[in-house]
Amino acid sequence: MPAPPHTEVAAGRFRQVLGHFCTGVTVITTADADGPVGFACQAFAALSLEPPLVLFCPALSSATWQRVARAGSFCANVLAASQREVARVFGTAGADKFAGVRWSPAQSGAPVLDDVLTWAGCAVVDVHQAGDHLVVIGQVTELGEVRPGEPLLFYRGRFGVPGPTVGPPEVVDTLLSWSRHGDWI
């Protein structure tokens, strides 16, 4: 495959355009000998059903990622709309992110934050460098219960919530579909 032509895309414009793609907000956590650690992550997605795989994309400079890599496992906590402050705390460098945050350990020891919509415990199975980030692939080893509520979304540089869900789920062959209308990963 030939290399694409080199074009300059300004970082600010790139951020502005892709900011129009709404994402969910997760907190990726792990625990090691130094205790629990985590970071807010909007670059998270389901990757495969067979086997069950997810991915997330930390910056190359992420100190939290280094600890996740050493631990070899992580938990992807799917935040609820009511957890904006949790997202802000875990999205800020240097703070004691677990001060005042209740959690319990997954089987791997990775923190499962209280009041999340759901969570997935995963083992790191592959890592690829992609520009100034990594693409981390995790095999799902356990899944949390799903609680009712709306997801926390990030759109155009702000946290938001979706409007009411109306009608049956969409059926699109190339997108992951769920059998229950209210399910969300």
Image (cartoon, grey):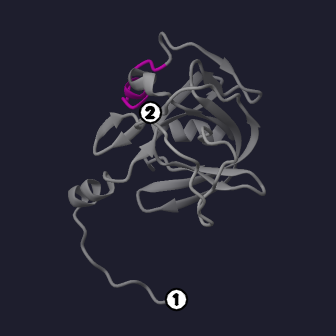
Residue 53, horizontal then vertical, whole percent? 69, 52
Residue denoted by label 2 = 152
- Residue 101 vs residue 148, the one in the foreground: 148
Residue 102, compared with residue 161, is above or below; it is: above
Q: Would you say residue 34 is visible in this rendering?
A: no
> Looking at numbered disc 2 in the image, what kind of residue is underneath it?
Leu
Residue 159, horizontal then vertical, whole percent? 34, 34
Determine crowd level at label 1: few under 14, some 14-19, many 20+ residues with C-alpha closer than 10 A.
few
Q: Secondary structure at mark 1?
A: loop
- Residue 179 vs residue 25, the one in the foreground: 179
**Image quadrant where residue 13 sits:** bottom left
> Looking at numbered disc 1 in the image, what kind of residue is underneath it?
Met
Q: Start and end of the magenta stretch?
A: 87-97
Q: In the displayed structure, does residue 150 sit left or right of residue 180? A: left
Q: Secondary structure at mark 2?
A: loop
**Image quadrant where residue 112 sits:** top right
